[in-house]
Amino acid sequence: MQSPEKEQKSAPGINGGRVYFGVRTSQSSKRYMVEVIEAIFWFGTENNVKFQREIQ
């Protein structure tokens, strides 16, 4: 068992899975990252977040 300082933190996912915090996104699959981005947009839409696309 890991010490409390190094324990992997997680929360319930939208579709019943688990969301783990502190995961390196550079090592995540493309499919996983698409699901993360979709979850962000879903949460934002449900909570009246106004997303803005920055154009440079």
Image (spheres, grey):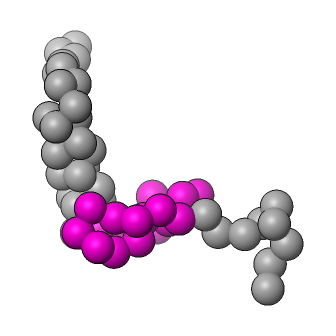
Q: In terms of depth relative to the viewer, which is nearer, 37 or 7? A: 7
Task: Report the residue at 34% width, 64% height from top.
Answer: 13
The residue located at (64%, 69%) in the rendering is 8
Q: Is residue 4 left or right of residue 7?
A: right
- Residue 19 sits in which quadrant? bottom left
Vertical side of 22 occupied by 47: above or below: above
Residue reaching furthest bottom?
Answer: 1
Residue 37: x and y in percent read 24, 49
Decide if residue 19 is on the left or right side of residue 38. Answer: right
- Point out the image quarter for the N terminus: bottom right
Task: Give the quadrant of residue 2.
Answer: bottom right
Question: Looking at the picture, how far across and down is residue 9, in whole percent?
Answer: 61, 63
Identify which residue, 20 or 55, lies in the foreground: 20
Q: Is residue 30 magenta?
A: yes
Q: Residue extending furthest top?
A: 56
Left or right: where 11 falls relative to 17: right
Magenta part of the protein: which range?
10-32
Q: Residue at x 23, y 42 (%)?
A: 43
